[in-house]
Amino acid sequence: RAFTIAIDGPAASGKSSTARAVALELGLGYIDSGSIYRCATLLALRNKISDIDARHADLIGLISHSKFDIRILRNVWLNNEDVSKEIRCADVNRFVAEIARDAGVRAEVLKIQRSVAANAEKKSAAAADGTTPNGVVMDGRDIGSAVFPNAELKVYLDASAMARAIRRWDQMNSARNAQGKRSEEDGAQTEKPAYPTVEEIAREIEERDYADINRAHSPLRIAPDAVVIDNTNLTFEQQVHTISDLARE
Ligand code: C5P
């Protein structure tokens, strides 16, 4: 069987960028499982399904008849259309948690996660030069506990709410600077929207953690055999190497 690494953790713990870097370092495939939930949400939005309970069968049918193609550099194709940008829009951000809470949706996504991983494993086996293990790295919230309970390596990444808030703020800041530069070049006089402070973001992250942990069907679980890595005081390179070294053991 191919080598599987599960990386789980709360919002803004850096799991996606870490998982991708580990996959590149070890020559494995990488799958961002949140993007599958985002595609399911896009299907609901495009088909005007706002009440999941009322149109549950329609939504499950749409998901099960769609083609998902998740590429290593995060390009996501849904029914042969590149939806990489659209699945990160504000409407999807707002609606995705509600879609991901539905047990029927989770059961469909689980099938997709396993088949996408099997495909990625085939591809990485074809590309392997014999020195790297064949397999896949998948990040999410319940990969080690539910999707791949037999994964060879399970990592639970965590960081303090403040550390995660600072990273989020940095990301927002660089996006805002890039946007400002573009408007300046265009000579546009755009009104500046209000941006949250680091403290406000930290408070929101703490509230989301609390809701995630206390929700009846929260997907976020620490598998009993997961290695817990708190990256509050680690550099990005340190945490990537820590995980790659664990995988090589
Ligand atoms: O990781 P990302 O923020 O893109 O995930 C989007 C949403 O998908 C999460 O907020 C969560 O509600 C859901 N999700 C999940 N289980 C996973 C991955 C993501 O419920 N394994």
Image: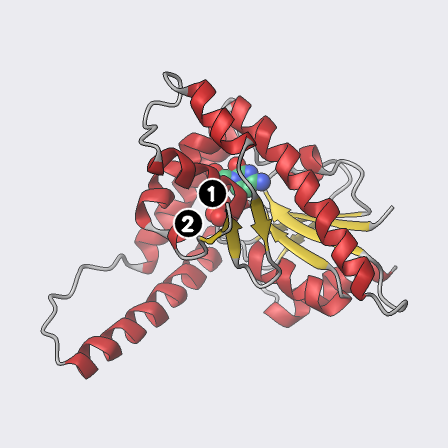
Screen quadrant of the C terminus: bottom right
* Alpha-carbon span between mark 2 and mark 1: 6 Å
Q: Is residue 228 above or below residue 149?
A: below
- Residue at the disc numbered 1: 39
Q: Are marks 2 and 1 in contact (CB under 8 Å)?
A: yes
Q: Is residue 122 visible?
A: yes
Residue 87 shows which numbered tag? Answer: 2
Left of 77 or right of it: where is 92?
left
Where residue 67 sits, quadrant-wise, is top right
The residue carrying pointer 1 sits among few (fewer than 14), some (14 to 19) or many (20 or more) residues within 10 Å by Cα, namely many
Q: Position of residue 197 (x, y in %)?
A: 28, 59
Residue at 56% in and 29% down: 106
Residue at 77% in and 59% down: 124
Instruction: Look at the numbered disc 2 and give the secondary structure of its residue.
Output: helix
Residue at 34% in and 59% down: 198
Q: Amino acid at mark 2?
A: Ile
Q: Position of residue 135 (x, y in %)?
A: 78, 54
Tell which circle, 2 or 1, labels the residue nearer the N-terminal end. 1
